[in-house]
Image (spheres, rainbow, N blue to C red):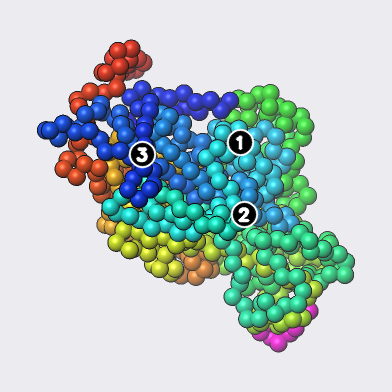
């Protein structure tokens, strides 16, 4: 049974296991890297050490990225093993924690998942300011949790991994890392390499002719230049109508003389997942929470928590836990009701949301035909568009649907031949969401999977892939990014990775790699399941690599509960293994004793504690 750790609310932890080793030693290998000493064997080939003593071995785990996923690993991994069993190092390219929430600072940037559930399960925050929180507040939350749980000691900030090459003989990854403060390249190694760099971590300029010939400030939503000022003399263009643009436009419209928004495709604008009842319920002990209600009024659809509400959350942890549960429960319940194309909920959502969008566009009814799609609600990622449709109806806003032909020094020329003069151009065009790592990586036998992933990324259960030994990733292909809150999913992925690390340690495994046939079987299942869903209903989406009818590689084939249930018990049979002892995979059994056997003070009947079966 792998080690499990119960993390208490105050940051302490208690371990459920007693057979793990207390101390490990390490040495220098012939190539100068830190590794493990050779175990001692008897003439008969018996390893002279108790079962799972870990004698001589310290497993080095390197994690790339200190966003939400990397922070979770930094909290949970060290608490899952006795001191010295795992040597953890986290490299983060940014000067602060929190990944995309540090990088994205554009006006209006916020999470489209309610704050109380966009939090770790073990670290609730009673002091969120709003139902939906800003990027700055989310960044502060994750960094605060990291500090509280002691993660910084494992992290090197402003260190960017530039290459990772698998060494079959050593069973290790050879790494090169650029130290950004001076450009120096340092070398490291990893027995296990974890890619937690995330999906939204590599922004890109749109492929538009002449883009960089524009003479005014050219901004990207993911690299916002806060030195650029907007006032009533400014004409600004915004390219895109995805999640970033939907948040940026309402913030810029009141500031500028004129705003032209260039829209390539229609999109559904979601109702905010909240109502005034949600926040106000927190001050009434017996109130019934209703997180499924939604308001159309942009001024009240993201309510601020009052001082009384936050005090109640702080003083009554049980109430806060129930409040969080209500939100998460209702959020997860929606998946079953609306994901199948032919479901009653999915069919009803189309006319219902269309009517609401038309009502919000009443000042410019002609926009309805330009914006409201004919494909299913949720085919593209839904964003609670607080104030977006209302902003499009303002007198100083023009919605441009003619395609962009090219950018010139003065502005944008569209396919209808019109020049749109601009002072500032904003590209709210998103990220490279192919999930390809943005460093050179070479797996077993020279395998470079990034070539295959350029068209359609594929993997095993979103966190492993064939020909990539001892390599795991958070939120790879078919991650549950549209299936519910991503934080509990990342926790499940982290726990899975920890179980794989435990197996490596426990059974003296040198390398573990998912079988090609297991990977392909999962891909085949996913492709067979997807056509019934809203994601295959005719929209152009990054879930399908920016295509209309391509393979769905951006979402999980099931609910968030489905995903978490599967990862709870790894299918170890889907992997191949190499062992430290090439002669016997059972050498890890050692000399026939456990640590409890050889420790005079150890409990030799611990299995009786808590024994019993309910009648």
Nearer to us: label 3 or label 1:
3
Q: Quadrant of residue 290?
A: top right
C-alpha span from label 2 to label 1: 22 Å
Residue occupying image coordinates x 64% and y 37%: 144
At x 62% / y 77%, what residue is drawn?
208
Q: Secondary structure at mark 2?
A: loop
The image's mark for residue 181 is 2
Instruction: Give, as a single range, the part of the protein colored magenta.
Output: 414-421
The residue that appears at 76% across and 46% down in the rendered structure is 300
Query: Measured from the top left, where is residue 205 in percent x and y?
Result: 61, 70
Name the element at disc 3.
strand
Closer to viewer: mark 2 or mark 3: 3
x 43%, y 29%: residue: 83
Residue 292 percent coordinates (x, y): 62, 43
Q: Is residue 371 magenta?
A: no
Pointer 1 residue: 147
């Amino acid at each position: 049974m792998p080690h499990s750790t119960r993390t208490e609310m105050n940051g302490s932890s208690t371990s459920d296991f007693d057979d793990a080793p207390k101390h490990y030693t390490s040495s220098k290998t012939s190539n100068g890297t830190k590794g493990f000493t050779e175990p001692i064997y008897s003439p008969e080939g018996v390893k002279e050490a108790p079962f799972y003593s870990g004698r001589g071995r310290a497993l080095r785990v390197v994690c790339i990225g200190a966003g939400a996923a990397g922070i979770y690993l930094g909290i949970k991994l060290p608490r899952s093993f006795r001191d010295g069993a795992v040597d953890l190092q986290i490299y983060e390219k940014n000067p602060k924690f929190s990944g995309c929430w540090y990088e994205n600072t554009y006006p209006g940037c916020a999470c489209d998942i309610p704050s109380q559930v966009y939090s770790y399960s073990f670290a609730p925050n009673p002091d969120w300011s709003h139902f939906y929180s800003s990027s700055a507040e989310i960044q502060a939350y994750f960094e605060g949790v990291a500090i509280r749980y002691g993660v910084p000691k494992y992290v090197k900030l402003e260190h960017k991994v530039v290459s990772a090459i698998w060494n079959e003989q050593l069973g290790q990854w050879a790494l090169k890392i650029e130290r950004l403060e001076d450009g120096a390249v340092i070398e490291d190694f990893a027995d296990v390499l974890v890619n937690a760099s995330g999906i939204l971590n590599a922004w890109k300029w749109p492929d538009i002719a002449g883009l960089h010939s524009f003479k005014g400030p050219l901004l990207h939503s993911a690299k916002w230049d806060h030195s650029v000022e907007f006032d009533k003399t400014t004409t600004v263009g915004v390219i895109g109508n995805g999640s970033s643009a939907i948040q940026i436009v309402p913030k810029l419209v009141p500031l500028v003389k004129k705003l032209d928004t260039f829209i390539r495709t229609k999109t559904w604008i979601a109702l905010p997942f909240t109502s005034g009842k949600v926040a106000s319920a927190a001050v009434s002990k017996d109130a019934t929470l209703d997180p499924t209600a939604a308001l159309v009024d942009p001024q009240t659809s993201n309510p601020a928590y009052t001082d009384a509400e936050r005090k109640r959350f702080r003083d009554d942890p049980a109430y806060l836990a129930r409040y969080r549960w209500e939100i998460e429960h209702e959020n997860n319940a929606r998946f079953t009701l609306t994901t199948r194309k032919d479901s009653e909920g999915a069919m009803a959502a189309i006319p219902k949301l269309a009517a609401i969008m038309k009502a919000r566009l009443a000042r410019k009814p002609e926009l309805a035909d330009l914006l409201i799609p004919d494909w299913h609600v949720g085919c593209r990622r839904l964003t609670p568009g607080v104030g977006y449709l209302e902003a499009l109806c303002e007198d100083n806003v023009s919605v441009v649907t003619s395609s962009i032909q090219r950018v010139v020094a003065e502005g944008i020329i569209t396919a209808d031949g019109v020049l749109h003069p601009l002072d500032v151009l904003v590209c709210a065009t998103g990220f490279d969401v192919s999930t390809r790592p943005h460093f050179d990586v070479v797996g077993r036998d020279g395998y470079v999977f990034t070539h295959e992933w350029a068209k359609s990324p594929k993997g095993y259960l979103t966190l492993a892939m064939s020909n990539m030994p001892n390599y795991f990733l958070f939120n790879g292909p078919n991650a549950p990014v549209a299936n519910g809150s991503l934080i509990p999913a990342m926790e499940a992925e982290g726990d899975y990775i920890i179980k794989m690390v435990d197996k490596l340690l426990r059974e003296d495994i040198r390398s573990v790699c998912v079988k090609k046939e297991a990977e392909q079987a999962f891909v085949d299942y996913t492709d067979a399941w997807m056509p019934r869903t809203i994601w295959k209903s005719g929209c152009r989406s990054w879930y399908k690599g920016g295509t209309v009818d391509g393979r769905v590689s951006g979402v999980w084939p099931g609910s968030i509960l489905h995903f978490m249930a599967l990862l709870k018990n790894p299918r170890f049979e889907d992997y191949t293994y190499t062992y430290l002892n090439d002669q016997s995979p059972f050498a890890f059994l050692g000399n026939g004793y456990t640590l409890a056997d050889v420790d005079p003070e150890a409990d030799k009947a611990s299995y009786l504690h808590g024994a019993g079966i309910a009648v």
